[in-house]
Amino acid sequence: MKVTRETPDQLIIENNPIWLAVFISAFAMVFIAVGLFLMSTEFWMGVGFTVGGIFIGVVFNLAFTRRTQVIFDRPGNLIEMRRKSLLGYSKRSWELQHLSSADVQSSRSSNNTTTYRAVMIISGGMDAGTHPLTLVYSSGSGAQNASNAINRWLHAAG
């Protein structure tokens, strides 16, 4: 997650996982290339590698590659979350007055790797609760940076 605009009136945080899409596609292309090479000697094994590579590329890009933009607009008293993926576009909004803070959720895998995601804590309205900014957890400091930016911007008005 990256802060792309921070003014007293507006905060914009984005997650644009272009490198993830590139790596997933490159990984899939290796399987496709191996499959095409194998087709000349072991046809069915080559077909299996090629179909597997296409499947990996398509499914993983659909599941994990999603651009997210969250706009916090003080004059409009609005939080708007926009998500765009290969499957389409979605938009969700909340009233800014109900945002109490931001936090970071963590997830630990079986090999003790910890990943994170930033969440908004909405304390009122019909959507009260915890709302993640991204659907997937990731490594690095992006979630903490986003949470810090939201809390800093939110308390600057106070």
Image (tube, rainbow, N blue to C red):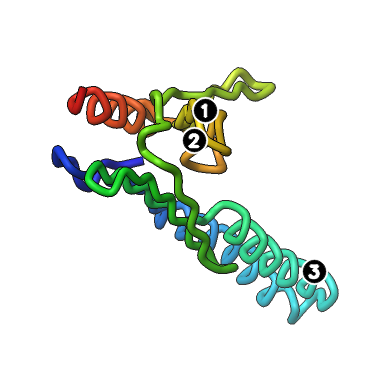
Q: Nearer the viewer, mark 3 or mark 2?
A: 2
Element type at mark 3: helix
Picture coordinates of residue 145, whole percent (x, y) = 31, 29
Q: What amino acid type is highlighted by mark number 3?
A: Gly
How far apart marks 2 and 1 lie (CA) works out to 5 Å
Picture coordinates of residue 9, whole percent (x, y) = 17, 42
Q: What amino acid type is highlighted by mark number 1?
A: Thr
- Which is nearer the N-term, disc 2 or disc 1? 1
Picture coordinates of residue 31, whole percent (x, y) = 65, 64
User: In which image quadrant can residue 108 be found?
Assistant: top right
Residue at image location 21% in from the left, 22% down from the top: 158
Disc sitting over residue 115 in the figure: 1
Residue at image location 27% in from the left, 46% down from the top: 73
Picture coordinates of residue 150, whole percent (x, y) = 31, 31
User: In which image quadrant can residue 144 be found?
Assistant: top left
Residue at image location 57% in from the left, 67% down from the top: 29
How far apart marks 1 and 3 lie (CA) works out to 33 Å
- Which is nearer the N-term, disc 3 or disc 2? 3
Residue bearing the label numbered 2? 138
Q: What amino acid type is highlighted by mark number 2?
A: Ser
Circle 2 packing at 10 Å, graded few (<14), some (14-19), many (20+), is some
Circle 1 packing at 10 Å, graded few (<14), some (14-19), many (20+), is some
Residue bearing the label numbered 3? 48
Left/right placement of residue 152 relative to residue 67 reads: left
- Which is nearer the N-term, disc 1 or disc 3? 3
Labels 2 & 1 near each other (Cβ < 8 A):
yes
Left/right placement of residue 51 relative to residue 96 reads: right
Decide which of 38, 113 is in the foreground and name it: 113
Decide which of 25, 98 is in the foreground and name it: 98
